[in-house]
Each structure stands twice: as C-alpha cells, then as structure tokens.
Amino acid sequence: MNIMSEAAVEKALDQKMNTVPYKMIGKDVSVYYGEKRALFDVNLNIRENTVTALIGPSGCGKSTFLRTLNRMNDTIENCRVTGKITLDEDDIYDPTIDVVELRARVGMVFQKPNPFPKSIYDNVAYGPRIHGLARTKSEFDDVVETSLQKAGLWNEVKDRLQEPGTGLSGGQQQRLCIARAVAVSPEVILMDEPCSALDPIATAKVEELIHELRSNFTIVIVTHSMQQAARVSQRTAMFHLGNLVEENDTDKMFTNPDDQRTQDYIMGRFG
Ligand SMILES: Nc1ncnc2c1ncn2[C@@H]1O[C@H](COP(=O)(O)OP(=O)(O)O)[C@@H](O)[C@H]1O
Ligand SMILES: [Mg+2]
C-alpha cells in the first residue's frame, strides 16, 4: 500500500500547482497616490487558467494591485506605478503598448454592475464592434450568443435581447458585464468584489460561473470574503498595509498558512 504522509500529499499538490505557467508576472510593483505609497514592492505572479484571489483587510491595496494589471491606474490622477508587470512576454507599462488593446486582453468586471444604457445585445456587441472583431450581422449574433452562453445568461435573456441591460436584476446585470468582458476574448479577467452588490443566490451563480470560466480564462478576483476566496480560487494572495504577506495554494492558505499575519486574519483577529 502506498500511503502518503499529509506533508507528502501537500508537496505533491504544490508541485502540481507549481507546474502551471505564469500568465502575468508582477515584479517589485509599487503604487503611489501623490505622496502616499499604497503598495510596497509587491512580487506576485498570476498563473494561467487559475483563479487567484486577493484578500486582506480594507485599504490594504487589493484593488490598487488589481488595477495595475490592466493599467486602470492610468485613469487616476496622481497615481504612479513603479516596478515591472508582464503579460506573457509583453511589458504592459512599455510606452509603445496600446492601452485599449491591453484592456481587451485583460478585461475587468467591477464591484457594482455597470451595464451601458443600451440593449442587452448592444452591451455585448460593443467590445467586438470597437475592436473590429465582428463585421456581419451573423458574426455579431454569434459573438453575442456565445458570450451570453459563457456568462450563463443566454437562456434567461435570449427572448429579450433588445431590452435595456439596466432592466435586468442585479445578478443578471453582473453576468451581462461578464458577458461583455468575455465578448472580446480576453486572456485575463480581473474582478473587483464582483458579488458585493448581489444577494446570496446571485452570488452563488456568479461563483459557479467563475469556476467554469477558469478553463478558458485566467482570473484574478478581489474579495473581502474569505469564504468566497476558499470557494472559487486555487491560489490566494494576502495583502496587509500595502505589502504582499503571502501567496499560496488556497487550500494551504486556509488550513496551514506560512505567515502569522495570514493566520491571524483568517482567524478573524483583525480586519
Ligand atoms: N484614488 C485614490 N487616491 C488616493 N488614495 C487612494 C486611491 N485609491 C486608493 N487609495 C488608498 O490606497 C490604499 C489602498 O486602497 P485600495 O487598493 O482601494 O484597498 P483595498 O481594495 O484593499 O480596500 C488605501 O489607503 C486607500 O485609501
Ligand atoms: Mg478594494
């Protein structure tokens, strides 16, 4: 009989996870808002086709780090990023990078569902239109249907595609935003507390969806809910006061973390 010790099993799992290639590499990433430094030399790599959860107390820099991954920080006045972030081989802060194209490769879903004041159809067709990914009516129909399928929304909306997206329930609106992000075939999808405005049933649906999306996309999700991180992610990164405290396999993170601060946080001792 071959009985592996717990430590050996853990090591084997870690090694399995450790063979997953990096989709994005963050090296010595620091972020300043004017004089205020919000991130301190963060070294965090994002694995391909993996859900990575960013956790930690409010104000620790989760959203700030997430925004560095598709240069959403560029839109914030006074915000400065140092260090290096690559997507595959590309340095995303290189001055020659087309930021619009970058954000098509690294899409984003926000805390509050924010569909455009347009029809359900046009919400999804918008990205493919501006990026020239579809030309004919049937190509648009195709990408709209496929994207709504991937977002688990097709069956609920297929008979009312011309109705406004804002008329959907909160949970449906958030899945519409996910469909909109998916429509341009991104490689990475960033989600900043995507369920915080949703009820438990809508939350469960979005969480299930995140699970499914992992086979086609690399996902980074900020969540203030440790239960959610444990449910949806394979890797978890814990931030505290602008520092990356620990990044680990999610199972290990929630059972046997390496860092005392992670231990204290998951035990509810702060934050
Ligand atoms: N636009 C901004 N201008 C100035 N300071 C900001 C801005 N956004 C975030 N901060 C500050 O940066 C720190 C990290 O914030 P944030 O990344 O939003 O944390 P989290 O998402 O973990 O709650 C906080 O101290 C916050 O006040
Ligand atoms: Mg935040």
Image: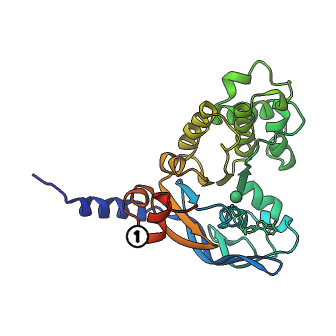
Q: Could you say which is closer to the camera, residue 101 or residue 201?
A: 201
Give me the residue at 48% from left, 50% from top.
Answer: 230
Give me the residue at 78% from left, 30% from top.
Answer: 141
Location of residue 55 with respect to 30 vertically, above or below: above
- Answer left or right for 107 relative to 76: left
Give me the residue at 71% from left, 56% from top.
Answer: 105
Give me the residue at 67% from left, 44% from top.
Answer: 196
Mark 1 is surrounded, within 10 Å at the Cα level, by few (under 14), some (14 to 19) or many (20 or more) other residues, namely some
Amino acid type of the residue tagged 1 in the rendering? Asp
x, y percent for residue 199: 65, 34
Render colour scheme: rainbow
Q: Quadrant of ligand 2?
A: bottom right
Location of residue 182 with respect to 18 vertically, above or below: above
Of all residues shown, which one is farthest toward the front? 269
> Which residue in the protein does label 1 denote?
258
- Answer left or right for 269 relative to 164: left
| Corner quadrant of residue 24 | bottom right
Q: Could you say which is closer to the camera, residue 49 or residue 34?
A: 34
Location of residue 27 with respect to 142 vertically, above or below: below
x, y percent for residue 237: 53, 64
Q: Could you say which is closer to the camera, residue 235 or residue 32?
A: 32
- Answer left or right for 160 relative to 18: right
x, y percent for residue 46: 56, 63
Instruction: Indicate the quadrant containing the C terminus: top left, top right, bottom left or bottom right.
Output: bottom right
x, y percent for residue 94: 76, 76
